[in-house]
Image: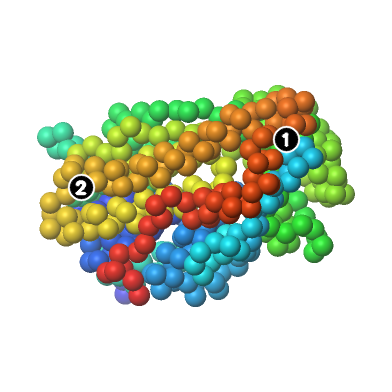
Amino acid sequence: MATPEAPVPTATTCLIAGGGPAGMMLALLLARDGVDVTVMEKHADFLRDFRGDTVHASTLRLLDELGLGDAFAALPHRMVESVNLAIADTTLTMDLTHLPGPHKHIALVPQWDFLELLATAARTEPGFRLMRSTEVLAPIRTDGRVTGVRYRGADGAERDMAADLVVACDGRASTLRAAAGLVPRGFGAPMDVWWFRLPRYEDDPSGLNGRFADGHGCALIDRGDYFQCAYLIRKGTDAALRAEGIDSLRRGLSALVPWIADRTAALESFDDVKLLDVQLDRLRRWYVDGLLLIGDAAHAMSPIGGVGINLAIADAVAAARILAGPLKSGTVTTRELARVQVRRWLPAALIQRVQRTVQDRAIAGAIGNAQAARDTPPAIRIANRFPVLRRVAAYGVAIGPLPEHAPEWARR
C-alpha cells in the first residue's frame, strides 16, 4: 500500500521566506530553542552558481559555537589568508593571519554546500520544516497585522499558512518588502560586475587578488583549480559592452592581468559571463507588525569585501536571540522587532558607509578614468606606511563591527 502523504500544514510559529544564509541560520537557531519554524524556499535545491561564497572568520567562529565546525571543515573549501589589492603601481596587502581567535582566514565554499550543512543540522530538530519549490506570494493581514502568507507549493496549488511572525529573508528583490510598502533608501553604485571562471594553475598567486589600472578593474578569487573572477564595468554598460563581443573582454583582461592572458580563451562567449547588478540600499524601518526583514531584504550590500553573507547571518543570530523567548510565549510585538533593528542597524550602516567611500573615491575613478587609475589613492599609500592600519582593515573585512555569538541554548 502507498504511504499516505503528510497533510499540508496550515500554521507555524515562525515562517521564514527564503532559504538563503540568513533564513537557514535563523531557522536552525530558533528550532534549537524549541520554536516551530517553517522555511519556504522557492527553488527545488540550493544549486545556484555565482552566489556569495565567502565565509568570514566571524561566521567560522559561530559555526564552532554551534558544533558545526568539523562538518564545515569536511566541505570542499579554500582558505584565504591574504587580500592583495594593486592600484596603479602600488600593492596593498592585508594579512589575515593576525586576526584574533582560531580562524585567521576567510573560507571560500560553494554556497549550496553551506546551506545544505545548515539544513542538515536543522532537520535534527523536531520543530523545523523546510518546504522547497515553495514560493511566498503575499502576506496575509488581519486587522493591519501580518498573520501569515499566501504561497504556491511544489504542486502548483496556492494555499495560506498562518504564523505568529513572518521573517522576510527573500533578498534584495523581496516580495514581502514590496507588499508591505517598505521602500529602501538607495545609495547608488558606479559599477556592475561580470562574474566568470578562468583556469588556475598551481604556481598562480593564491588568496584574493585585485587589480585596477587604465580604467579597468578585476578581482581574482582563488578557488583551487579555477579563479572566480569579478570584472568591474561602469554601471549600466552591460549591453553595450556585450555588443563589442567576447574578444573585447579577453583583450581587457589580458591588458589588466598579463599573466592570465594565456587562458582567456576559456571564455567562449558571453554565455560564460554572468551580470551582477550591484545595489547598495537600506530600509529606514525593518519591520511592520507581524513582519521582520533581515539580510539583503533589509540592506542590500555591495560585493566590496564579500561581507553580505556574514552580515545577513549576524542579523539572523541577533534576531534569534531576541525573538526566541517571545515566539515561545506568543507575545511578539513591534517592540521586539524594533530591538532587532536597533541591534543590527549600526553594523550595516558602518559597513555600507565604508563601501560607499570605496566606491565613490576609488572604484568610480579607477574604472571610469584611465588617468585616475594610474594614480595611487592617498589612503593606499598611508596604509602601506602603517602596518596597524592594514591590520585594522583586515579585521574590518574578516570580522567586522559587532560580531554576533551563538546563544547558549543553541550551542552544541
Q: Is residue 318 visible?
A: yes
Q: Which mark is residue 336?
A: 2
Task: Give the residue displayed 33% in from the left and 71% down from the top.
Answer: 411
Frontmost residue, 31 versus 320 = 320
Q: Describe residue 340's horizontal placement relative to residue 89 as left or right.
A: left
Q: Residue at x 56, y 69 (%)?
A: 75
Judge depth for marks 2 and 1 and give the one in front: 1
Q: Position of residue 247 (x, y in %)?
A: 83, 35
Q: Is residue 383 above or below residue 190?
A: below
User: In this figure, which residue is indicated by the disc labeled 1?
Assistant: 376
Left or right, residue 341 beside residue 311: left
> Where, quadrant-wise, is the N terminus in this rendering?
bottom left
**Label 1 crowding class (10 Å Cα cut-off): few <14, some 14-19, many 20+?**
some
Q: Element type at marker 1?
A: loop
Q: How many marks?
A: 2
Identity, as a three-letter code, of the amino acid under mark 2: Glu
Spatial CA span between label 2 and label 1 = 47 Å
- Looking at the image, the residue that sits furthest to the front is 386
